[in-house]
Image: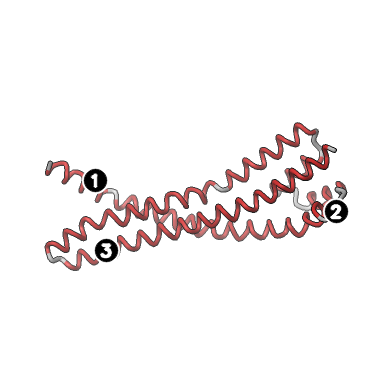
Amino acid sequence: MNLLSNLMFWVSNGLLVPVIAGLIYLFVKSLLLLGTLFGTWQSYRRRQETFAPLVENSSTLDLDALRTQAALRPDAPFERTLIAVLDADPARRNLLIGHYELLGEQRLSTAKILSKFGPILGLMGTLIPMGPALVGLSTGDIGSMAYNMQVAFATTVLGMFASAVGYMAVHVMRGYNRNDLIRLDYINEKLSR
């Protein structure tokens, strides 16, 4: 039994470096995601200013105005999909809108990973150094205990930061995607009549 306990202790301590490396990676990804989120917000705000008056504020749909506005940014995903929807038959329009929905979910993958793995790695990074910290406490090695507690708390903070950024990004970007899909569905319905 003692051999198994020692083996588990060595394995868990051996995981500390990969866990810390993973947390640093997630932290860097979360900082990059904050920049992406800002760019996404700017694009969404521009789409709102451009397309909301054309789609939501009139009873008739001005297809020429929609085409003109979408053609100004043909490489943007929403505008590219809108141009294709305006020129497609009903079955193809549904396919294009479905593809846009899948693309929106794919763009959320990094944020979802951060929100799930941040707490997992943070908890692992907290628990792994607690064993050596308790050993240091029992032997009177306060310096070792303090160092291990410092590592434990730092990994917790990194994990929670990455998770918070991921959680916020998932909800904000999902809301933007839903609004875009509502607008595309409305245009599809208007074209079907």
Return the disc, 2 or 1, that comes first in the chain's sequence.
Answer: 1
Return the disc, 2 or 3, that comes first in the chain's sequence.
Answer: 2
Above or below, 98 against 124 in this view is above
Give how far apart the Cα atoms at labels 1 and 3 are. 19 Å
Give the numbered dot on residue 107: none
Q: How is the image coloured?
A: secondary structure
Question: What residue lies at 50% left-to-right and 60% top-to-bottom?
Answer: 31
Question: What residue lies at 69% left-to-right and 46% top-to-bottom?
Answer: 181
Return the disc, 1 or 3, that comes first in the chain's sequence.
Answer: 1
Percent position of residue 121, x then y: 37, 52
Name the amino acid type tagged 1.
Answer: Val
Asked which secondary structure carries label 1, the reply is helix
Question: What residue lies at 30% left-to-right and 60% top-to-bottom?
Answer: 152
Q: Which residue is mark 1?
A: 11
Name the amino acid type tagged 3.
Answer: Met
Closest to the camera, between mark 2 and mark 1, is 2
Percent position of residue 169, x then y: 55, 55
Name the amino acid type tagged 2.
Answer: Ser
Closest to the camera, between mark 2 and mark 3, is 2
Closest to the camera, between mark 1 and mark 3, is 3
Give how far apart the Cα atoms at labels 2 and 1 are. 65 Å
Asked which secondary structure carries label 3, the reply is helix
Asked which secondary structure carries label 2, the reply is loop
Q: Which residue is mark 3?
A: 149
